[in-house]
Image (spheres, grey):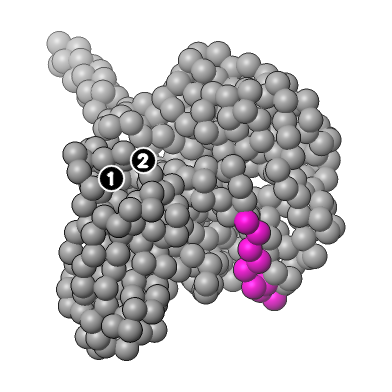
């Protein structure tokens, strides 16, 4: 009788734990070749997977992973696809590695489809002999802004190749962040919060990330202080202060920052062994983040609900997991992970601690900055009842522009915020003006006191 009660207790605990902590489940397989597959999730029902060896290969689900269909690759060059970003079931961007195998780099290309893959059109290419697109990433909060980042097309140590769009990918502008001696960048390490704050992992030297907090005007290196040199993962909270990063071999440790990437400290996930790859994702609008890696082909997946300070192991059965991605709709998170060889797993769970639900306001508004007075950083919030082109600029007492936070940037309806950094300005009174679709919405003053 005691044995029977004990068995019932164990079974109850197993089922109770499974219900309390949703785990990953199998979600099919795709016949993909190559060792660097990527996935992009744009809705709970739509996700795209890319990869290929000596030929581009792309797959898509439109029913939440129940079935996956091979997407035509008409118009794509015979090169391995190294990164993917899906806008919806029809529109998608892919970036190749510059050569057929995706190993040596070359004249790398970003291509786009607007008809579900029936046709692909080249958007831009790096030129040179060492281009390799590591990531195409759009902001979750400012969906019109995105970047496509490539290794230096002239070789490690040379200026990087980074394209920027402010209108959802309709047009792109080339920028060239300064090169770093001996370094290129790491596949799928690209991170974007908004048009001011983005960056990527480096692939050589100490474990490092390369970031900007002012829209590319300046770039800085964050040294992680963890094992490994190939920084394969970088993710940040929407507050642009708390972030996490890892190298392909840093497990069981990752790096964490609470000051926007200036300094980093090591955090243990738990567990033992050495990984051969890693990925990190932060769920926008929450303090929830996920880690993925593999040890001798076996998956290791962890979850944090307090901004990466503490982690809990999750169950995942597919071997050779390589990359994952998520989308949040309300309090429900949907994620897909893809493995080398094509196995796919899926996670659907409820997240708590939503930091801000972006409800649609009834009127345009520009809030007083906070803190005020400030030194040197303050936050400016504004609200839009419908989508529009936003300009938000800061002026000194002479009427001269001293800060252009947004210049005719497309925003959706909702509540938005941006940090203004006055570290290069003198103490004084400054004015900031919000303009939407050419119409001045409001004007406010703020005080910088040093």
* Real-space CA distance between mark 2 and mark 1, rounded to the nearest whole angstrom: 7 Å
Closest to the observer, 15 or 88: 88
Magenta stretch bounds = 173-182
Task: Report x, y in % for residue 75.
Answer: 79, 30
Q: Which residue sits at x=67%, y=27%?
A: 58
Residue assigned mark 2:
387
- As drawn, is 409 to the left or to the right of 351? right
Task: Report x, y in % for residue 287.
Answer: 29, 48
- The rendered magenta stretch, by its main secondary structure, is classed as loop
Element at label 2 = loop
Task: Report x, y in % for residue 41.
Answer: 49, 32
Q: Are marks 2 and 1 in contact (CB under 8 Å)?
A: yes
Q: Which residue sits at x=39%, y=58%?
A: 391
Q: On screen, 386 above or below 271?
A: above
Residue assigned mark 1:
384
Q: Residue furthest front?
A: 439
């Amino acid at each position: 009788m005691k044995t029977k009660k004990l068995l019932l207790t164990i079974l109850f605990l197993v089922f109770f734990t499974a219900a309390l902590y949703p785990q990953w489940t199998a979600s099919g397989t795709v016949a993909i070749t190559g060792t660097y597959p990527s996935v992009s999730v744009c809705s709970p029902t739509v996700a795209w997977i890319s990869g290929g060896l000596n030929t581009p290969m792309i797959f898509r689900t439109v029913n939440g992973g129940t079935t996956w269909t091979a997407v035509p690759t008409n118009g794509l060059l015979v090169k391995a696809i190294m990164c993917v970003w899906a806008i919806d079931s029809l529109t998608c961007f892919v970036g190749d590695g510059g050569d057929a195998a995706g190993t040596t780099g070359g004249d790398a290309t970003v291509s786009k489809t607007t008809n579900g893959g029936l046709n692909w059109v080249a958007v831009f290419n790096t030129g040179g002999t060492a281009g390799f697109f590591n990531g195409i990433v759009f902001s979750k909060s400012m969906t019109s802004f995105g970047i496509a980042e490539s290794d230096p097309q002239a070789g490690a140590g040379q200026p990087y190749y980074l394209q920027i769009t402010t209108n959802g990918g309709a047009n792109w502008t080339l920028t060239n962040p300064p090169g770093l001696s001996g370094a290129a960048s790491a596949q799928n390490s690209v991170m974007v919060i908004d048009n001011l704050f983005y960056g990527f992992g480096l692939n050589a030297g100490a474990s490092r990330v390369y970031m900007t907090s002012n829209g590319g005007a300046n770039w800085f290196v964050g040294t992680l202080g963890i094992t490994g040199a190939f920084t394969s993962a970088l993710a940040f909270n929407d507050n642009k202060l708390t972030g996490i990063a890892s190298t392909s071999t840093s497990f069981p440790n990752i790096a964490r920052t609470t000051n926007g990437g200036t300094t980093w400290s090591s955090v243990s996930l738990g567990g033992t062994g050495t990984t051969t790859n890693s990925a990190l994702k932060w769920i926008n609008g929450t303090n929830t983040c996920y880690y993925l890696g593999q040890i001798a082909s076996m998956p290791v997946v962890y979850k944090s609900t307090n901004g990466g300070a503490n982690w809990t192991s999750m169950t995942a059965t597919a071997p050779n997991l390589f990359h994952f991605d998520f989308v949040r709709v309300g309090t429900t998170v949907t994620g897909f992970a893809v493995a080398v060889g094509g196995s796919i797993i899926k996670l659907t769970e409820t997240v708590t601690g939503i930091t801000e639900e972006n409800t649609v306001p009834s009127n345009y508004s520009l809030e007083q900055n906070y803190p005020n007075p400030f030194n040197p950083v303050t936050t400016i919030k504004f609200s839009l009842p419908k989508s529009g082109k936003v300009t938000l600029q800061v002026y000194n007492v002479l009427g001269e522009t001293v800060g252009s936070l947004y210049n005719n940037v497309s925003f959706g309806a909702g509540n938005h915020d941006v940090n203004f950094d006055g570290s290069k300005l003198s103490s004084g009174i400054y004015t900031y003006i919000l303009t939407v679709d050419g119409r001045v919405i409001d004007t406010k003053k703020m005080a910088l006191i040093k």
